[in-house]
Structure formats: C-alpha cells, structure tokens
Amino acid sequence: MRAHSRCALAVMLALALTPSARAAAPAGWIIAGTAPAHYLFAIDTLSPVSASKSASITARPEATARGFGTLMQMIAAHDYRGSRLRFSGYLRTLNAGRAQMWMRVDGPDQRILAFDNMHSRPVTGTKGWKRYDIVLNVPPDSRDIAFGFLLAGRGKVWGADFKLKKVGRAVPATSHGSMMPRKPRNLNFEQ
C-alpha cells in the first residue's frame, strides 16, 4: 500500500499543471499537484535562514487532506547519472496538515527509478525553520530529476535555501531504488 501511494503521488506530481497556475509560478519553478487551485503560491521576505526570500504555499479554505499543491522543478539527469544526489532545503510551517520536500528520478519510458517524498517524516503543525535532506541514487539510465516541496491539507509552508548537490557514497540514501516491488508478494494471503 505504501509503495502504491508513493507511486500514485509521483504520477500525480507529473500531472495537474494548469495554465493559470503556471502564470503565478516563481521564475524557474512549476506549480503542480493534485489540487493546485486549492493553494496560494507566493514569494515572501520571511526567511531568516540565509536567503533574502522564501516561497510559500498556503491552503485555501477548499483545500482537503486528499489534495496537495507543490512548487517544483524538473531537470535533465545527464550531469548526475551514476551519482548520489542530495536535495536540501529549509521548511517552516504554520498549522500545516502535511508539508514535505520530495525528489524523484525518472528513467526510460517514464519509469520511476528512485523517489522520496518524506511520506514517513512529514512536517506537521507549526514548526520553525529546519533543514531537511533527501538523498537518492541517480542510476546510469536516468532521464529526468524532479524535486520540490508541497503542502497537503490545511495550513501554510515556507521553503527557502534549496540546494541540489552531488554527494559521496558515505552520505546515506533516504530511499532505496524504485517503490515498485520486482516480484509479486503474498498472492495467497498467508503472510
């Protein structure tokens, strides 16, 4: 179930771009998600981290826990193939349902090769600025790398000082490989 929900989230991240949302995106970023119209996206000067600005995602009244809005980027994987990549940044929340950073590595035929969306470690409630890291392996056949931060449900999240950097193998990956199992499991329901 967990792998299925992660895969579904990854697919939904690739969808849901709206023309009106695209117009409001900060330079270099894309607004997406399952319900981007239920969120406000803005640039904010509230960033005591090190940058002069941050970006925020704020839930509108119609936002529900089932939908989310994300600010994201997508780049070619060519320069990162065969390496381990860390996406880091700072998040701050106010009454957040679920705030999460995420990164996905896609391969041929839009196969998901690696994915982590902080599903098991979301930022909820009200929290001050804190750094979060996502570290994934980028296989040699990788095509694209997508990354960003999201808000699901109510509240507000700010994101600032994001970095994407190659790291050595001594830095542990936060997710290992694809979310899809290679073989079926428990077909007779005995486990």
Image (cartoon, rainbow, N blue to C red):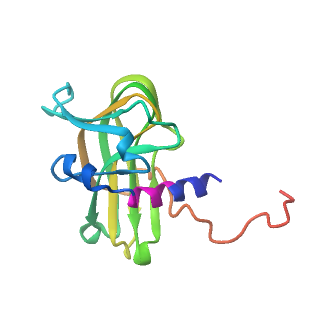
Would residue 12 be counted in the magenta stretch?
A: yes
Residue at image x 21%, y 46%?
A: 24
The span picked out in magenta is 9-15
Residue at image x 52%, y 37%?
A: 65
Tell me where residue 131 sits by quadrant. Answer: top left
100 on left or right of 51 = right
Q: Nearer the viewer, residue 42 or 51?
A: 42
The kind of secondary structure the magenta stretch mainly shows is: helix
- Residue 51 at what x, y percent from top left? 15, 34
Q: Nearer the viewer, residue 165 or 31?
A: 31
Total number of numbered discs in the rendering: 0
Residue 183 visible, this angle:
yes
19 on left or right of 189 = left
Would residue 46 be counted in the magenta stretch?
A: no
Residue at image x 41%, y 56%?
A: 13
Residue 149 visible, this angle:
no
- Residue 68 at what x, y percent from top left? 43, 43
